[in-house]
Image (tube, rainbow, N blue to C red):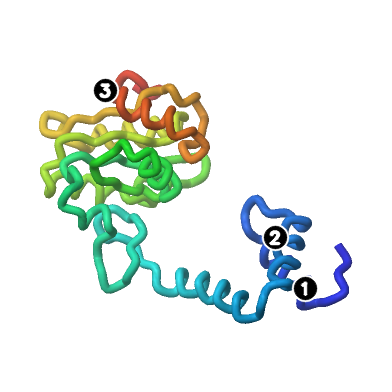
Amino acid sequence: MNLPSKLLDDAVNAFAALPGIGKKTALRLVLHLLNREEAEVEEFSETIARMRREIAFCEKCGNIADSRETPLCSICANPGRKHELICVVENLRDLIAIESTGQFSGSYHILGGIISPVDGIGPEDLQLESLIKRVKEDNVSELIMALPPNIEGDTTIFYISRNIDKSKTRITAIARGISFGNDLEYVDEFTLSRSLANRLPYENYLVNK
């Protein structure tokens, strides 16, 4: 793509570096910003910069927190949530997907990935030890495994189940109304809500029993 300005070209390349955005879409976004007032574009860029600069992560679950001076996210700090009930997810996108259903009143734990030996990701690379510690210290009554329905997700569930006292903490998995291999973030809210409501003992789904 030959552009008449290096500044324009640099801006297009910056947008095109974002996932799911090609050069044509990036150019359309850049031209849109070019037609806006300078103050509006500066406010837009400052909002993004401020988000990256000031955002923090919850020290308990790994969710987003609005201030680095506040150690807990809004969910963990909410006394109205059921903190004895933890939904275990792979990443922030999955947390947002479940929270968008409005059907879950417990808390979360973001692992930051799933066990995948092929990709060189082991238990020590994830937030698994903090989850196990949290279950022991917070008297968690149930862990809901909302991990991707694939072999890597099942391997991660199996690892967690081997390190949790199941006489004190029930381990369940969301119902497989979600096709094997699908990512939670692409599942519609109705199906996700139903999968949460119809969760079953994790042993029903494990590939690596």
Q: Secondary structure at mark 3?
A: strand
Looking at the rendered structure, the kind of residue marked 2 is Ala
Q: Circle 3: is it few (<14), some (14-19), or many (20+) Cα within 10 Å?
A: some
Q: CA distance from mark 3 to mark 2?
A: 43 Å
| Residue where numbered disc 1 is placed | 8
Q: What's the residue at 34%, 40% (across, down)?
A: 102
- The answer to whether residue 65 is above or below residue 101 is below
Q: Quadrant of residue 11?
A: bottom right
Closest to the observer, 55 or 120: 55
Q: Position of residue 33 (x, y in %)?
A: 69, 70
Q: Secondary structure at mark 1?
A: helix
Q: Is residue 99 left or right of residue 135?
A: right
- The answer to whether residue 203 is above or below residue 118 is above
Q: Position of residue 56 (x, y in %)?
A: 36, 66
Query: Does the residue at mark 1 contact the one at mark 3 (Cβ under 8 Å)?
Result: no
Q: CA distance from mark 1 to mark 3?
A: 55 Å
- Judged from this view, the residue extending furthest toward the bottom is 39
| Residue where numbered disc 2 is placed | 16
